[in-house]
Amino acid sequence: MRDTTPTLRVVSTLAVKGAMGELGARFTGETGVRLDIDYGPTQAQISAIKDGARGDVVVLTHAGCEDLAAAGILERTVDIAISHVGLAVRPGAPRPDISTMTAFRQALLDAHSIARSRVGASGLFFGDLLERMGLAEALAGKVKIVNGFTGEAIVRGEAEMAVQQVSELMVVPGIDVIGRIPKEAGGSTLFSAALFADGKAKDHAARLIDLLASQAAKSVLAATGLEPR
């Protein structure tokens, strides 16, 4: 018998994967609609959409949603949460002080290897940050560029330290998440949800966005390392 259960396709940044597990299950329980979620680095997802990838709902950076909306691809952008770039190390390793820019700079210099993402928002930010801090040349041989979750490089023994959105670091078991980098460094990103303008399931898609932006979702977002809007 053919499965006729309705399904929504969601194109999403990795930054909200932790929250989407619980919120997606809640949505399916309330509506009977399943979610087919394609997770990937933000810039890779935006490029794929510009190249023709489509679905029903996106969860991307606010800037990315606005750019795609201006092109007529998305509509009804709703802000969900702010994500902060953070740092993680191996369990049991000394926890570096990153409470100030001076301490953070020293922690980076002391690290033997640092994993950053290739095309995620945090990876692009971190590459620019090292330039601004004057550390790009000094750390060139230490930075390991990886795809997906940078914390997995720690688990595999390929890196001593990982830099990514705190919410993305928290998804990876077996690492010690220190917390966000100093506010003065920047690295805070607003993430939003939006509808595909040519989506076929607008009612269900709108209901999912309503859930992601609801008061009920705030505790889930906060528990997974995000700052709810």
Image (cartoon, helix red, strand yellow):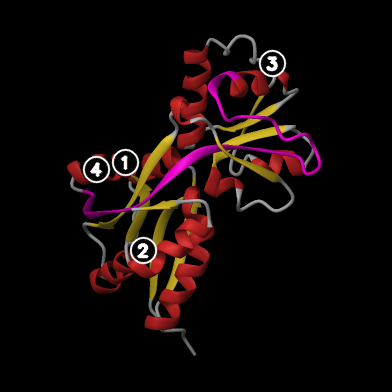
* Rendered image: mark on residue 141: 3
Say which of 187 and 60 sits in front. Answer: 187
Q: Is residue 209 magenta?
A: no
- Mark 1 or mark 2, which is nearer to you? 2
Task: Give how far apart the Cα atoms at labels 1 and 4 are.
Answer: 5 Å
Q: Which residue is mark 4?
A: 66
Secondary element at image label 4: helix
Can residue 5 be seen by looking at this rendering? no
Residue type at the position of mark 2: Leu
> Which of pointers 4 and 3 lies earlier in the amino acid sequence?
4
> Which of pointers 3 and 2 lies earlier in the amino acid sequence?
3
Task: Give how far apart the Cα atoms at labels 1 and 2 are.
Answer: 18 Å
Q: Position of residue 162 (x, y in %)?
A: 65, 35
Verify CB contact (< 8 Å) between mark 1 and mark 4: yes
Q: Which residues are magenta?
A: 73-102
- Against 166, residue 117 (above or below) is above
Task: Give how far apart the Cα atoms at labels 4 and 3 are.
Answer: 36 Å
Say which of 197 and 23 sits in front. Answer: 23
- Against 75, residue 93 (above or below) is above
Residue type at the position of mark 3: Gly
Q: Is residue 118 shown left or right of residue 178?
A: left
Q: Dot 2, how many residues are within 10 Å of its Cα: few (below 14), some (14-19), or many (20+)?
A: many
Q: Position of residue 71 (x, y in %)?
A: 20, 42
Task: Give how far apart the Cα atoms at labels 1 and 3 are.
Answer: 31 Å
> Which of pointers 2 and 4 lies earlier in the amino acid sequence?
4
Q: How many marks?
A: 4
* Rendered image: mark on residue 212: 2
Q: Residue at x 72, y 20 (%)?
A: 110
